[in-house]
Amino acid sequence: MACTCSHEPAPQKPNSKFRTALWIALFINLAMFLVELIGGAYAHSSALWADSLDFFGDAVNYGISLAVLGASLYWRATVALLKGVTMALFGLVVIAKTAYAYVQGIPPEAITMGTIGVLALIANVIAAVILYAFRDGDSNMQSVWLCSRNDAIGNVAVILAAVGVFGTGSLIPDLIVAVVMSILGLTGGYQVIKKAMQERKQNKMVSA
């Protein structure tokens, strides 16, 4: 039933299942951040390095989402707006890192890259499955789901890039994946920003 009241909706009661899912996703992302940070540096892989930053950003986002559970829609949307901007900025950072790697011209170590890519894919699929049920929630929930979905897609691309690097000895497949991941960050950030701004606007109208 639609509420016709003129006041701001009451803060959403924290969803215990969503809270548990966030904690699991938080620990998964923190662990994979460390694995890919070290592995990416060792393998000279732009895609792994970029993915490690993505894992770290997601862990921070999940922590923020946990902090605002039970807050009003306006504040949940405000946090989601900040997360959307972060996702978009991540895309820009990856583009800059890709350009730097191209100038350096050092091909990544394919075996390490592929192995870590498979491990990261397993971790992200677990997180995405856990968060799948909350994909149609408010902008805050949607941003959490998009983060995990984008990560899983990115990991498949990293694995394919590792195969490409192994077969060609070139760094180009690694750079292509890094660009794809930057596009995912930009488009995902745009979706979250758009929905969060709509929710903030609607909430202001209801509160007026």
Image (cartoon, rainbow, N blue to C red):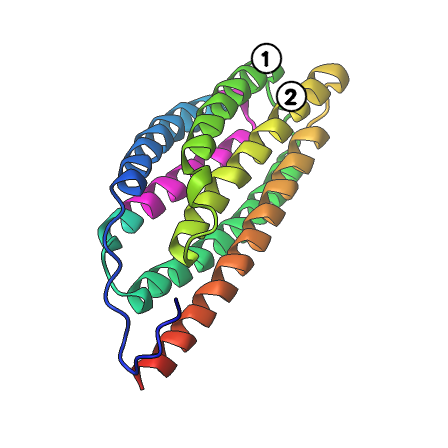
Residue 197: x percent and y percent? Answer: 45, 70
Instruction: Please tell me which residue is depicted at 54% across the width and 19% down the height of the picture.
Output: 118
Q: Earlier in the sequence, mark 2 or mark 1?
A: 1
Q: Mark 2 points at which residue?
A: 162
Residue 55: x percent and y percent? Answer: 42, 36
Residue 86: x percent and y percent? Answer: 43, 55
Name the disc covering residue 111, or none.
1
- Tell me, yes or no, whether the highlighted magenta stretch contains residue 60: yes
Q: Which amino acid does label 1 sit on?
A: Ile
Q: Which residue lies furthest to the right in this view?
A: 168
Instruction: Please tell me which residue is depicted at 52% across the width and 29% down the height of the picture.
Output: 48
Instruction: Please tell me which residue is depicted at 41% across the width and 63% down the height of the picture.
Output: 81
Above or below for 9 versus 160: below
Residue contact between numbered discs 2 and 1, judged by CB atoms under 8 Å: yes
Residue 169: x percent and y percent? Answer: 72, 19
Instruction: Please tell me which residue is depicted at 39% across the width and 31% down the height of the picture.
Output: 33
Above or below for 16 versus 1: above
Question: Which picture quadrant has residue 130?
Answer: top left
Q: Residues within 10 Å of mark 2 (few under 14, many from 20)?
A: many
- Helix, strand or loop at label 2? It is helix
Residue interval drawn in magenta: 42-63
Q: Which residue lies furthest to the front in this view?
A: 1
